[in-house]
Image (cartoon, grey):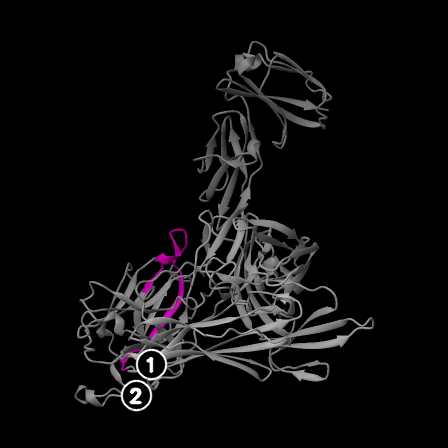
């Protein structure tokens, strides 16, 4: 069960993805055997997987494209034999034959269409489909492409398109971003049971493909890599097909009544585990006697137990709970979990009946994150550039101490040189209270893609029953430190602090943080290898990812444990097209580039094992000319046809509202400059001093600074000005504020303690709504 926490907690989301009513979705290489389409007259002879209806886009006139575009080849749906778009090019295929449907939108490279539309875009089959009497009809298709933070879906209707229901979407596929994700297999087969969606009129089913970018929110763009679809079909499903859609292993009830999952568990925090799962009847008939069986396999020792039975009517889910709990044995290593559902009726489709997972028991490492990175997080909404801490809630099952925090650093070069730290908070039933913190740590290139262990200033004692929040933290800035994330996890169990306020991450992924619960005689090693290589651990060669635990007896008689985590790395090669401004640099590994050219760098990926090649196509854009001239109170930018923003040099170069033209007319004395921008690159002009705008000549003549020049000691005589409404500000020649006084109480002021350096100075006098500037020199 998912739950929310604290009415005062702010909600943020890594990716908030919303859909309509959806059917159950399965992504498979082989879902059910697809046979050739049979004539309608043989309807009584159909088998599971027989095609009821299909279209392979060989006749484009069967489909109609719609959307906010005038050119669907650049923005929207089209049908053809080759790929389209900036990412996949115009000469590829999707792994099928003949025509296929193609969706593209925008081109960030600058070489294609600049227009990007937010959608929705649809491609609708022009005729309706009669599915009357078809058991559990499944909508299937092949797809290729990749997804940004957008909606790619297939919808069905039974009322002529007045109401559409979402049959399947790609929201469960990680978007392709700098934090993770990948392109789809070529091709990927998708299948969804649409029976629950067509009960209105199964004889009048319409189908359409849908893309929509509006789920990004109004402040984001709607760019898409591309989405390709082929061989859309409806096949006959099964009468008896119960499947497992989600599986859980939970421990404790101190924070969430259903418990939390723990993927890495130390010996001193072992406790009981409850197994449960969600079973869904994907068949057309009631499935009787449905039950869940959970199995645990540790080094050949198997635990097995089942749930009570239930009867599932078609297209309904139910939660099943294994009767007996399980406590891991005392041995370190990997414990493999297996969940399987079945019932009294013989399963006609069995490849969706089982889910697997695993945990690792260690000597002293404790974590709720699966040790496989699936994404990353730098910040949360509305907190960009500010300090942030984020982590996982955990329960303590036995008294002990916390000695360190492990933080998995995301593998991006922007992390190099950034600061991070770890914190622990203890929950008192109302608030999470600070309990301890590590030293700050500067991330190095060798830390990218790895876990970094940071010690607390002193061990943090914790008691059985305590609820703690284990966080990774950064200090903001640009770029911000990027932490690794793992599997999706329980709502309300990923919390943090942004600008001092507690927040809860919605649709959360577990943060890859851990705490150490032992200190002496425990050594953790990481042994990365490249795919196809092996590593020798005490005479045994290992070729795949695993955890090897070795026990030794130390000289003083104490037990010591060496735990070696073997990680298999995969090489890759990629090309990046980069634009920078003159004077900027672009860093790839240990190489720094400042001029236009094509470069190649060989790097070590993630764990320091596999060579990877990064190709960089770099363009350096010259800075625009920011020279100015002036006449009286008007300043002119010399170069025409660019973007301009005039700024106040005396106010930390703050932009002057509305002043974006080539010339600037000063309305009061001051020091001004212009920021000139061309092709995304900006230059700032020298500051120009404008005097005598506010006061008339006779009024300004009343104000005297003497002697002028002087040696840093001088007198200011305000003459007949009304001193109660007078403000003084002294700046040096480059606009830096030296002195200011808003409570002038004498018309004659003497200054001899400002420690002025040799140079030109400007005394600004503001009286009521008038301002004047007096210039003097210090020799």
Horizontal and vertical percent for residue 681? Answer: 52, 49
Q: How many neighbours does mark 1 have within 10 angstroms: few (below 14), some (14-19), or many (20 or more)? A: many
Taking 704 as reference, is 206 left or right?
A: left
Secondary structure state at the residue bearing disc 2 = loop
Horizontal and vertical percent for residue 305? Answer: 48, 79
The residue at which mark 1 appears reads as 241
* Comes first in the chain, label 1 or label 2: 2
Kindly identify the residue that appears in the image at 30 percent across and 65 percent down. 21
The residue at which mark 2 appears reads as 35
Taking 149 as reference, is 265 left or right?
A: right
Q: Residue furthest right?
A: 555
Q: On the rendered image, what quadrant is the N terminus found in?
A: bottom left
Residue 335 covered by magenta stretch: no
As rendered, which of 435 and 257 lies closer to the eye?
257
Secondary structure state at the residue bearing disc 1 = loop
Horizontal and vertical percent for residue 65? Answer: 26, 67
The segment highlighted magenta reads 211-236
Q: How many neighbours does mark 2 have within 10 angstroms: few (below 14), some (14-19), or many (20 or more)? A: few
């Amino acid at each position: 069960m998912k739950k929310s926490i604290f009415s005062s907690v702010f909600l943020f989301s890594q990716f908030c993805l919303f859909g309509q009513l959806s059917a159950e979705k399965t992504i498979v290489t082989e879902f059910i055997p697809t046979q050739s389409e049979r004539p309608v007259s043989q309807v009584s002879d159909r088998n599971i997987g027989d095609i009821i209806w299909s279209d392979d886009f060989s006749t484009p006139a069967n489909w109609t494209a719609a959307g906010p575009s005038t050119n669907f080849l650049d923005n929207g749906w089209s049908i053809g034999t080759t790929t389209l778009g900036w990412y996949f090019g115009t000469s590829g295929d999707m792994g099928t034959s003949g025509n296929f449907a193609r969706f593209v939108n925008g081109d960030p490279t600058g070489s294609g269409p600049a227009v990007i539309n937010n959608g929705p875009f649809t491609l609708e089959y022009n005729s309706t489909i009669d599915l009357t009497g078809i058991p559990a009809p499944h909508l299937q298709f092949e797809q290729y492409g990749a997804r940004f933070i957008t909606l790619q879906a297939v919808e069905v209707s039974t009322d002529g398109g007045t109401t559409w229901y979402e049959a399947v979407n790609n929201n469960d596929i990680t978007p392709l971003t700098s934090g993770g994700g990948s392109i789809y297999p070529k091709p990927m087969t998708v299948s969804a049971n649409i029976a629950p969606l067509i009960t209105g009129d199964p004889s009048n089913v319409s189908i359409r493909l849908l893309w929509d970018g509006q789920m990004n929110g109004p402040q984001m763009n709607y760019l898409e890599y591309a989405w390709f679809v082929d061989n859309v079909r409806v096949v006959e499903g099964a009468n008896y097909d119960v499947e497992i859609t989600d599986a859980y292993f939970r421990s404790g009830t101190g924070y969430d009544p259903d418990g939390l999952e723990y993927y890495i568990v130390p010996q001193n925090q072992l406790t009981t585990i409850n197994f449960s799962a969600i079973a869904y009847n994907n068949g057309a008939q009631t499935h009787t006697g449905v039950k869940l069986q959970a199995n645990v396999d540790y080094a050949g020792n198997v635990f097995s137990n089942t749930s009570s039975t239930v009867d599932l009517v078609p297209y309904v889910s139910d939660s099943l709970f294994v009767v007996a709990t399980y406590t891991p044995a005392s041995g370190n290593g990997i414990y493999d979990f297996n969940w399987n559902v079945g019932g009294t009726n013989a399963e006609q489709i069995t490849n969706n009946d089982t889910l697997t997972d695993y945990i690792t028991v260690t000597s002293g490492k404790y974590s709720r994150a699966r040790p496989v990175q699936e994404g990353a997080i730098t910040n949360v909404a509305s907190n960009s550039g500010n300090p942030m801490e984020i982590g996982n809630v955990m329960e303590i099952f036995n008294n002990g101490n916390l000695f360190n925090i492990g933080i998995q650093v995301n593998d991006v070069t922007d992390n190099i040189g950034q600061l991070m730290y770890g914190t622990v908070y203890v929950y008192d039933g109302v608030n999470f209270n600070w309990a301890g913190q590590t030293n700050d740590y500067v991330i190095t290139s060798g830390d990218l893609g790895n876990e970094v262990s940071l010690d607390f200033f002193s061990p943090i004692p914790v008691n059985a029953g305590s609820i703690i929040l284990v966080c990774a933290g950064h200090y903001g800035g640009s770029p911000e430190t990027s932490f690794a994330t793992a599997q999706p996890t329980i709502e309300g169990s990923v919390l943090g602090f942004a600008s001092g306020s507690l927040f809860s991450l919605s649709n959360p992924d577990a943060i890859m943080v851990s705490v150490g619960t032992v200190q002496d005689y425990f050594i953790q090693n990481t042994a990365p290898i490249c795919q196809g290589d092996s590593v020798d651990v005490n005479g045994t060669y290992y070729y795949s990812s695993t955890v090897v635990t070795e026990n030794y007896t130390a000289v003083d008689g104490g037990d010591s444990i060496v735990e070696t985590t073997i990680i298999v790395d995969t090489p890759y090669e990629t090309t990046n097209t980069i634009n920078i401004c003159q004077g900027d640099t672009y860093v790839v590994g240990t190489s720094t580039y400042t001029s236009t050219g094509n470069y190649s760098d060989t790097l070590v990926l993630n764990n320091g094992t596999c060579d990877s090649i990064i190709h960089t196509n770099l363009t350096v854009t010259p800075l625009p000319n920011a020279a100015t001239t002036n006449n009286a109170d008007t300043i002119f930018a010399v170069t025409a046809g660019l973007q301009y923003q005039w700024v106040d040099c005396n106010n930390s170069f703050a932009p002057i509202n509305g002043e974006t033209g080539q010339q600037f007319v000063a309305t009061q004395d001051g020091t001004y400059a212009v920021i000139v921008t061309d092709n995304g690159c900006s230059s700032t002009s020298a500051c120009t001093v404008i005097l005598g705008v506010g006061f008339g000549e006779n009024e300004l003549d009343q104000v005297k600074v003497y002697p002028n020049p002087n040696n840093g000691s001088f007198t200011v005589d305000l003459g007949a000005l009304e001193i109660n409404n007078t403000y003084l500000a002294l700046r040096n020649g480059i606009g830096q504020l030296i002195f200011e006084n808003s409570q002038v109480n004498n018309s004659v002021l003497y200054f001899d303690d400002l420690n002025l350096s040799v140079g030109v100075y400007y005394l600004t006098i503001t009286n009521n709504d008038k301002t004047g500037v007096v210039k003097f020199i210090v020799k």
